[in-house]
Image (cartoon, grey):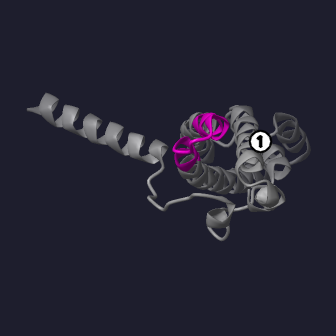
Amino acid sequence: MILSITLVVIALAILLLLLYIEGGQNWPVNGVEDLAGRTRPIDLEAFRNLVDTQEEDFLRANLPRREFRAVQRERTRAALEYIRNTAHNAAFLLRMGEAATRSDDPRIAEAGRQLIGSALRLRAYALLSAAKLYVRLVLPEARLSYDTLADNYQHLSVLASQLVLIQYPTQAARLSGLL
């Protein structure tokens, strides 16, 4: 009986994980205009600063232990917000990629497939990074790496820009302000 309950709980957890990674929201995104007002701007340099190990080492060396732990928790909470926003934006870019794959133009369809793959990867990394950060909230002195998430978000933004440049050349400049 306990095994059955455990398997059901694991199956539900896997289902929720897959729904999260797949995107969750079902809003259609066919172009840049559909992203306006739905995406959240991300300051990648600020995020990188929040998770930078050298910055953490500097704070650790220059702050009393109690103060370091408090500052580190605040930095972790801020980093979690960035991660939520990157996952949120990736869900919309996933939808944009799905719409692009239906194009008759093979370049647009291929760019859409690349965008989908990158968005799915980013959402998986976001989930993993968020889990690490929650551990860090409990153990502020834990050393964990988050470089992959920022790099993947930057790569996703580049792919989205390339798709928009092919599909909507006149709107390409708007995209950077939306991501």
Q: Position of residue 34 (x, y in %)?
A: 61, 65
Q: Residue at x 89, y 39 (%)?
A: 61
> Is residue 60 among the parts visible in the rendering?
yes
Q: Position of residue 118 (x, y in %)?
A: 62, 36
Asked whether 118 or 71 is in front, the reply is 118
Q: Residue at x 56, y 42 (%)?
A: 104
Q: Position of residue 144 (x, y in %)?
A: 68, 32
Q: Position of residue 145 (x, y in %)?
A: 71, 31
**Residue 60 relative to residue 159: left or right:** right
Q: Is residue 86 magenta?
A: no
Q: Residue at x 87, y 35 (%)?
A: 54
**Residue 95 relative to residue 164: left or right:** left
Task: Assign a secondary structure to mark 1.
Answer: helix
Instruction: Give the residue at the far bottom of this rendering.
Output: 37
Kindly identify which residue carries mark 1. Answer: 158
Instruction: Give the residue at the far left of this rendering.
Output: 1
Q: Residues within 10 Å of mark 1 (few under 14, many from 20)?
A: some
Asked whether 62 or 1 is in front, the reply is 1
Name the image quarter holding residue 126: top right
Q: Is residue 104 magenta?
A: yes
Q: Is residue 35 above or below residue 91?
A: below
Residues shaded magenta: 97-113
Q: Main secondary structure of the magenta part?
A: helix
Amino acid type, residue under disc 1 in the picture: Val
